[in-house]
Image (spheres, coloured by chain):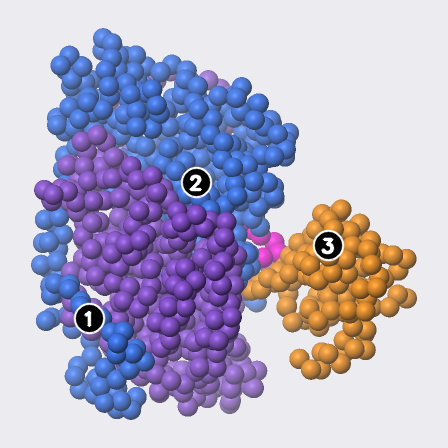
Amino acid sequence: MNDSHYCPHTPEEIREMLSVIGVASVEELFSAIPAGLRAKTFNLPPGLSEFETLDTMKAIAADNSACLTSFVGGGYYDHLIPAAVDHLSGRAEFYTAYTPYQPECSQGTLQALFEYQTAICRLTGMDVSNASLYDGGTACAEAVMMALRVTGRNRVIVDGCLNPFSRQVLKTYLYNLDVEVVEIAPLDGTLNRAELAGLLDQSVAAVLVQNPNFFGCIEDFSVLAQQVHAVDALLIASVYPISLGLLVTPGEMGVDITVGDGQSLGNPLSFGGPSFGFIAAKKAYIRNMPGRIIGETVDKQGRRGFVLTLQAREQHIKRHKATSNICSNQGLCALRGLIFLSSIGRQGLVELARLNRDKAEYAKAQLAGIPGVTVLQSAATFNEFTIFLPKAADGVVMELLKKGIMAGVPLGQYYQGSENCLVLTVTEKRSKKEIDRLVRELEVALCN
Amino acid sequence: MQLIYEQSVAGRRGVRLPVSDVPAATALPDNLLRREPAALAEVSELDLVRHFTNLSRRNYSLDTNFYPLGSCTMKYNAKALENAAGLFSSFHPMTALLPGGAEFCQGSLGLLYDLGQMLADITGMDEVTTQPLAGAHGEMTGILLIAAYHAAKGNKAKKKYVVVPDSSHGTNPASAAIAGYEVITVPTAPYGDMDIELFKKAMNDEVAAVMMTCPNTLGLFNPHIQEISDIAHGHDALMYYDGANLNAIMGKVKPGDVGFDVIHVNLHKTFGTPHGGGGPGAGPVGVKKALIPFLPQPRIVMDDDGQFLLEDHNPGSIGRTANFFGNFGVMAKAYAYIIMLGREGLIRVSEQAVLNANYIKERLKAYYDLPYDTTCMHECVFSAGKQLEHGVHAIDIAKFLIDKGYHPPTVYFPLIVKEAIMIEPTETESKATLDAFIEVMIEAALAAQTNPQQLLDAPLTTPVGRLDETKAAREQNVCCIG
Amino acid sequence: MAEMFFTKEHEWVKVKEGIGAIGISDHAAHELGDITFVELPKIGKTVKQFEVLAAIESVKAASDIFSPLSGTVVKINQALEDAPEIVNESAEDAGWMVWIEITDESELKNLMTQEQYSDYLKTL
C-alpha cells in the first residue's frame, strides 16, 4: 500500500495525536457508529500509483474512437480554444479555490466572475447576468422557474424547436409541480406563430424559444416579444453564444431572460461536461435570478472590490424560500468562457461567427448538389442546417460512422415524421477538404 | 486592479483565427444582424496572460493556503487527476446518442458505468446515475425520484412534506421546495442530533421523505439513525442521505445499510476533484432497487457481451436532469481518484480526516466554546461566544486568519450555533500544518482578550480590506456598462 | 397621535379611522442591520392577521413581515423601493411599509401595547 502521499501522517505522529485526543486508537473515534451498523463489505480493488492509474485511464480512453470528423452539434460544439484558456484557467489559484465566501482573499475569482457577468451582458444585450448555472438545459428550467415566480402564473409555452434535451430537462424540473407546459410543434423547422398567438393569454407565465433553433433556423423574435409582453408574460430565449458574433441580440429583440450553454466558449467537448449555463435578464428581474451574483463595491479606504451580493435570495439564507437550490455552479467553466471571449475579442468574435457561417453555407450548397437531397429553406441559418435525405437518416448516419464521419443528428428520434431529416453542424474547425469528403461519402451512402 | 475592459485598445486582439478556405457567404438580412459587435475586451495575448495571472494571485487556494472550510471538504486535488480528465476532452457526447454511436465511445460509457458501480459499493446502493451536475442538483434529482416512487404507488396527492433537521445544509430545504414539497424542520436536541421525540411528532403518512446529513453539519454521527429510518419507513417516507459529509465514513458504514434509500455524492468533496472557485462539481445519485425504475434517462447499461449501451425507453423515468451524461470531466477525475486510493486508501482517508478533526477539537477547546463536546467525525464546530464578550465576532477571527495566511473556516454555519466556526481539516493536511493553524487560532483567542482591535481591523494584508456589502446589495452594480 | 400596537414578531400597527399603518419596530430594524431591500405587496392584496404581508432583506438575512391585523392593502411606501435605509433611520415613522383597510379592529386584543412590547423586549 502506497497512498501515504495523500495521508501524510507517520505512525509516530498518529500516536501523538491520539494521545492528545485521549483515545487509544483511531478506531475508537468511530465508536459513535453502532457496531451493528458497520459496513460488512467494501469491495474496491487495492490502490495504484499515479502512473498505473494514468495507464488505466489511457486504456479506457483508447476504447473511444478518437478520429471521428464531427458534423454534429445538438447543443455542444467543436470550436477552437486558444492555448491561453487552458493555461490561465489551469492556474491552481483559480481551480483549487472554493466559492468566494471570503472576499478579501478571493478577489481573483470575484473580479473574474464580475468580468464574466459583464461579458455575458455585452454579448446578449441584457442588463444583468449571474455567475453561471450548470448547463444549457438546466438554465432553461431555471429561467422558467424564474418566470413562474415573477408572474405568479403556472402555464408555460415552449417552442418545439427548442433543443429536445433542454425540453426534457425542463419537464423533469417541473415533474412534481403544478405547472402546465404547452409544446408547439415546429412548422417547417420554425416557430408556429399562428398557433402560439392562439395560446397567448393572461394565464401564460412565459414563452420559451431558441435562436438559432434545433433545426439551425434563425428567427427574429422582436414582434413575438411585443405579443408576449401584451399579456404580461415573459419571453425567454436560449441562444448559442458564438452566433451572437453576428446575430441580433436577445436584448435588441426585447427578450426578458436569456439563457444558453457556454460550452462553445472555450470549454472542451469532454463527453458532455463540464460546461456552464448562462442566464441574463432585464434589471427588473434581478431579485428573482437564481444562483450567485457578484457585485462591485468599495472597502473602507474606497478601494474597488467585488463581493457575492444579493445573497438573501439564495439557499444558504432563504432555505426553502430561495430562488433556486443551486449552490456550486460551474465557476471554472465560466472563467474559461471569459478568458475565451477576452482572447478572441470584439472583432475576433465577429470573424469567428462569420467563419462558421461561411463553412456551413459552403457545405449546404455542396450537399444540395447531391441528387435527392434538399435543404430546409424556411429560414436563414448560422452554422447548423437541416437537410432532407431520400431515405431514413439513421441508416445513413450509421454508414458514415463506419467511415469515420459523424454526419449529423438524425431528427426521427426527436420529431415524428422527420425520419429522413438530418441536422448538420459545420464549425470553423471543419476544413473544405473534410466537408468535401462528407459530401462524397454521403453521396455514396445514398447510392447504396 | 483594472478590469480587463479598462485595458482594451480598439483593434487589439489576443488570438488570430485561421484563414477561411471556403467562399464568403451572402450576408444575412439586416433584421437578423446585431447592430454593433459585442463590446468584448480588446487586449494582446500578453495583456490577457498578465491580467488573469495577476488576478489568480489575489486568491487563496488549496495549493497555496490551508483551507479548513467546514462542510466543503477542501482536500488536496491530486495533479494526476487533471491529466486523467484531459484524456477525454475531445469526445463529443452526441456520439453516444447517434444510431450505432455507442460502439464508438465504449471507453467513456464504460467509465461512467464503472464509476457508478464503485460509488454503489461505497454507499451501499444498488444503482447510481451520474447525470446530476452538482450536490444540490443531486438532491433535487433524488427528491424527484422519491416523488416518482410515491406517484407510482398512487400517493402523489397524499405525500406533501419533506422533513429536514434544522442543522441541514440550506440546499436540502431548497431542493425539496423546488421539487414541489413543503418543508418541515425538526430542531436539534442538546445532544447535537435531530431531536428524536420531535421527529416522531413531525412524522405522519403525508411525509414523502426525510433528508439527513450523517454525520451532520455539527460533525456528529447520529446513533439513532436506524431508528429514524425505521420510523420513516413505517410511514412510507423514504430516507434521503446528503452525501456532503461522506468523507468521514468510507469503509466504516454504508448509508444503504442503515436504511437510506437515496444518496447523492459530492465528487468535488469526497473524491478529490477540485472545486474550481465554485464549480464544476458533480452529484451522482445512488438508489435502492425500488427506485431504479425512476432513474434519469438515458441510463447506461451493460449487455450480456459486456458492451455499454444507452437505454431510454423507460416510461417510469423522471426524464433527463441534464442535457448529457453529467459533468464527465469531473467523473473521470473521481474515477482516477478512487482507483488510485483503492480500498485501503479510502478507509485511511476517512480515518485520518476524523483523526485530524478530533485533534483540532481537543487542542482548541480550551480557547473556544465547544457547544457539542463529544467525539466528532470529520469536522468540529466551535462558537466564538467567549470572544464575543470582548466584542469580537466569528467573522473577525476569520479575517484575522486571512492576515496570517489561512483561509478561514466556515463561519455562521450551521445556523443553530451562535457565532459558529466550523473547521474541516481533511485528511491531506500534515500534523505540522494543523499545529501551525492551531497556534494561530490560539493567538486569535488571546488577541480577542488583549487586543480586540487587531481582530476588528483585519485583514490588513489583502489587496482590499473589508468590503461594503450593504452598498453592493443596494446598488447592484453587477456588470460594467460598456 | 394614533396609538401603536406590536406583535411578537416585531411588527407595529398604528390605527386611525379604520386604516392601519404597518411597519417594523426600531428593535427589529436594529437587529437586522443594514436593510437592503423591502418587498412590498401589491395594492389590493388581502391578508389575515399574522399572515405574511411583506418581506425584508439585509445583507445576510431575509425575513417575512407578518400583518398585525387582517385587512386589504390600500397604500404602500414606494420610497422604500429606492431607499430601504429609511427603515433603519426611522423604522417607526418614515419607514412605514403598508397601509391596510382593517377588516376587524377587535383583533387588536391579540397585540401588545407600547408598554407591553417594551416589557416583552426585556425578556428576549
In the rendered structure, the answer to whether residue A258 lies left or right of residue A85 reads right
- Chain-order first, disc 1 or disc 2: 1
Circle 2 sits in a helix, a strand or a loop, which is it? Answer: helix
Task: Check residue B358 in the rendering and tell me which mark sits there, or answer none.
Answer: none
B369 vs A331: above or below: below
In the rendered structure, the answer to whether residue B77 lies left or right of residue A291 reads left
Residue flagged by tag 2: what amino acid is it?
Leu
Q: Please identify which colour was used for chain B in the image.
A: purple
Q: Residue at x 25, y 39 (%)?
A: B311
Q: Please identify which colour was used for chain A in the image.
A: blue
Q: Which residue does the numbered mark 1 point to in the structure image?
A: A40
Residue A284, quarter of picture: top right
The letter of the orange chain is: C
Same chain for mark 2 and mark 3? The answer is no
Q: Which residue does the numbered mark 3 point to in the structure image?
A: C47
Task: Give the magenta-colored segment's residue range.
Answer: B472-480
Circle 2 residues within 10 Å: few <14, some 14–19, many ≥20 = many
Q: Residue at x 40, y 82 (%)?
A: B441
Q: Nearer the viewer, residue B20 or B411?
A: B411
B122 vs B49: above or below: below
